[in-house]
Image: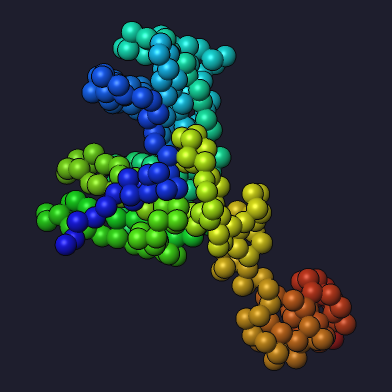
């Protein structure tokens, strides 16, 4: 009891493809070790390139390496110089012909590896672990994920005794094979020891047969509940990050339905403190037959107002 299955390994061959695609033959072990070397080398070499995963495919004499990254500009370099350097370095490492492809991740908030690394970097920068987890969950859900679970373990906040904390939002059906769940583990190297970060992101459910070729299966867009067309404004119609339900509610004019403003028997605007046509309507504050809903209704000083 209590033994957990790896969410990606559990779905291999059902809705997820393999990250290494080749026939092993008699030299299976050597190829496996070589794959691990390539991955370790690349993740250290382009640590700031936002690398999510590295897919390796082999033919008889050539190795094709596909780098999935959120920042293709850093990986490619000026005029493709960086890619050429990496290619030469991998040739020396493997002693084979190497081809490098770069695949851009359009929505990094929906990639578990990038989300986990983002939280780990924040922890290293001494940001409160609760704040880091909650802001990450909010941004992932805003991008249209169906659910997310984040777990951090270790000496959280520099505490003497290690502990585990986790936060969830939405649904993460780990036992449902057709649920497209992305999982990743990252480590934050803090001054008081390592802190592990685990992230599970549910991107919806996959119906029907899926193409398991490595560069298609993994790069699916979010489906199912909560999906929003790209470029649409978040929540209450405001495009910026803070404009959530709070901002939307304050402007929509439903704070106090009916009734008058604090300062006098408002005009036909009725309603609310700050919203619609309240302040200046009628013999309000500045007096005058205020018509509209903006402050200078009958200009403050004039008219038979209170002042």
Residue 65 in view of the camera: yes
Q: Specify whether 302 is left or right of 39.
A: right
Q: Specify whether 235 is left or right of 280.
A: left
Q: How many labels does the image show?
A: 0
Depth check, front residue: 92 or 261: 92
Q: Name which residue lies at 65% across and 56% down.
A: 233
Residue 125: % across, % down: 32, 42
Q: In which quarter of the image is residue 270?
A: bottom right
Q: How is the image coloured?
A: rainbow
202 versus 65 height, above or below: below
Residue 33: % across, % down: 25, 23
Residue 222: % across, % down: 54, 52
**Quadrant of the rendering where the C terminus is positioned:** bottom right
Q: Name which residue lies at 57% across and 68% down.
A: 245
Q: Name which residue lies at 48% across and 35% down.
A: 213
Q: Name which residue lies at 34% across and 55% down.
A: 150
């Amino acid at each position: 009891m209590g033994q957990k299955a790896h969410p990606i390994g559990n779905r291999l061959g059902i809705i997820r493809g393999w990250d290494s695609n080749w026939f092993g033959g008699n030299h299976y072990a050597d190829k496996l070790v070589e794959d691990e070397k390539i991955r370790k080398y690349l993740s250290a070499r382009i640590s700031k390139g936002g690398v999510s995963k590295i897919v390796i495919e082999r033919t008889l004499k050539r190795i094709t390496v596909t780098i999935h990254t959120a920042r293709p500009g850093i990986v490619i370099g000026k005029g493709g110089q960086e890619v050429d350097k990496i290619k030469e370095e991998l040739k020396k490492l493997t002693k084979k012909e190497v081809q490098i492809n770069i695949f851009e991740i359009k929505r990094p908030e929906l990639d578990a590896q990038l989300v986990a690394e983002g939280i780990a970097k924040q922890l290293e920068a001494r940001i409160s672990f609760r704040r880091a987890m909650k802001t990450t969950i909010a941004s992932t859900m805003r991008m249209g994920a169906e659910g997310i679970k984040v777990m951090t373990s270790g000496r959280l906040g520099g505490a003497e005794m290690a502990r585990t904390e986790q936060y969830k939002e939405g649904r993460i059906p780990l036992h449902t094979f057709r649920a497209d769940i992305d999982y990743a583990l990252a480590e934050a190297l803090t001054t008081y020891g390592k802190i592990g970060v685990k992230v599970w992101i549910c991107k919806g459910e996959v119906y029907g047969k899926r193409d398991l070729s490595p560069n298609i299966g993994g790069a699916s867009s979010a489906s199912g509940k909560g999906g929003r067309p790209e470029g649409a404004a978040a929540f209450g119609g405001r495009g910026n990050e803070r404009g959530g339900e709070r901002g939307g509610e304050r402007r929509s004019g439903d704070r106090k339905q009916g009734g008058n403003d604090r300062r006098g028997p408002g005009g036909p605007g009725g309603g609310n403190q700050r919203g619609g046509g309240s302040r200046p309507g009628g013999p309000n504050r500045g007096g005058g037959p205020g018509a509209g809903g903006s402050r200078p209704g009958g200009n403050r000083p004039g008219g038979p107002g209170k002042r």
